[in-house]
Amino acid sequence: MNEALTGQVNSGDVFIWASYVISAITLGGVALWTIIRMTSAKKKLAMLEQASASEKD
Amino acid sequence: MFSTFANPHRFMALSKWLLPVFAGLGIIMLATGWIWAIFFVPEEQYQGATARIMYIHVPAAMVSMAAYATMAVGSLLYLTLKHTLADVAAKSAAPTAAALSFICLITGALWGRPTWGTYWIWDARLTSMLFQLFLILGYMALRSAFQREQDAARAGAILCLVGAVNLPIIKFSVDWWNTLHQPAGFITMSGSSLAGEFFWPLLYNLFAMMFVFGALLMAAMRADIQNRQYEAKLARLNRSGS
């Protein structure tokens, strides 16, 4: 009630932190999901190549 | 020339060293850019500290549209030239494009509450961005409904190209209609309306987000190419075994 009437928005702190936290979680989630997909694809392909090579031998 | 670069083997070789560069730059620039925006950028005259949300919101909005444009170009090249790598790029850009559209909408709502007094309004800019998110989710759902990769690629590409009409609508919605969302001020034909102390951290965060998108796109493309190589090899082995 005693705040000066400056015309400036001054109730944003929780919104600022929420914005950065939600963005970090979303980007982190996509990055983690992509890394898991990339490593599992690489592993799967390597196993198949190994299996087909040992079959040839 | 395009065919030279559209070779999956060449892409795998190139992205092997380009991916860590983009990922490293993206992580370092995003971390420092956010610290710059939260702790060092001065408060804006009217928006106060709430303007700090802009340093995620604006880059997320711009890069999400660039990601959708990547999907559209990939789809067009796939439909016209039948390059598999173009389809791989379109498919791989979709999850990051959806995540960035989501971030743009959420941070916009969190900025709108203290500034406009509401989280949401059916304004042309906000609605067209929400439509972009639904389009990308629809694209991903449509692709997963098909068993054969070629059918998924074709149907997805058509949907993506039809949805590309939304890109200029998002961009020019603030000029074509009377919206609550403010018009473009960051990068315009006549320069920027932002003071240097706000412009440079925003530009830095935009580049950070572009590197993050580039890294995620390359990683997803590498995963998709290796999955396709696995499927092809497995089918070949099954044929030779039977």
Image: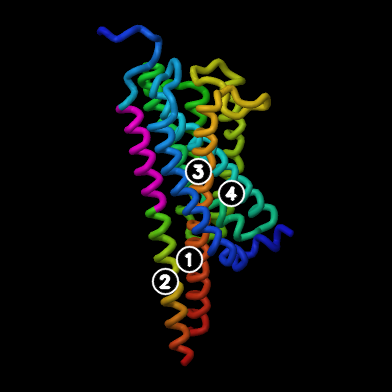
Residue behind mark 4 = B157
**Rendered image quadrant of residue A25:** top left
Q: Is residue B2 left or right of residue A41?
A: right
Give the vertical position of B223 relative to B141 (above or below). Answer: below
User: What span is in magenta?
Assistant: A14-31
Label 1: chain letter: B
- Foreground: disc 3 or disc 1: 3
Q: Earlier in the sequence, mark 3 or mark 4?
A: 4
- Identify which amino acid the numbered label 2 is placed on: Lys
Magenta-drawn stretch, dominant element (helix, strand or loop): helix
Residue B123 in the image: x percent, y percent? 48, 21
Tell me the crowding category of disc 3: few under 14, some 14 to 19, or many 20 or more residues within 10 angstroms, Cα based: many
**Residue B221 appears in the picture as rendered:** yes
Residue behind mark 2 = A44
**Rendered image quadrant of residue B41:** top left
Label 2: chain letter: A
Residue B97 in the image: x percent, y percent? 49, 43
- Identify which amino acid the numbered label 1 is placed on: Asn
User: Circle 4 sits in a helix, a strand or a loop, which is it?
Assistant: helix
Q: Residue at x 43, y 42 (%)?
A: B32
Q: Nearer the viewer, residue A37 or B184?
A: B184
Tell me if label 1 and label 4 are in contact, CB under 8 Å: no
Residue behind mark 1 = B227
Q: Residue furthest left?
A: A1
Circle number at residue B83 = none
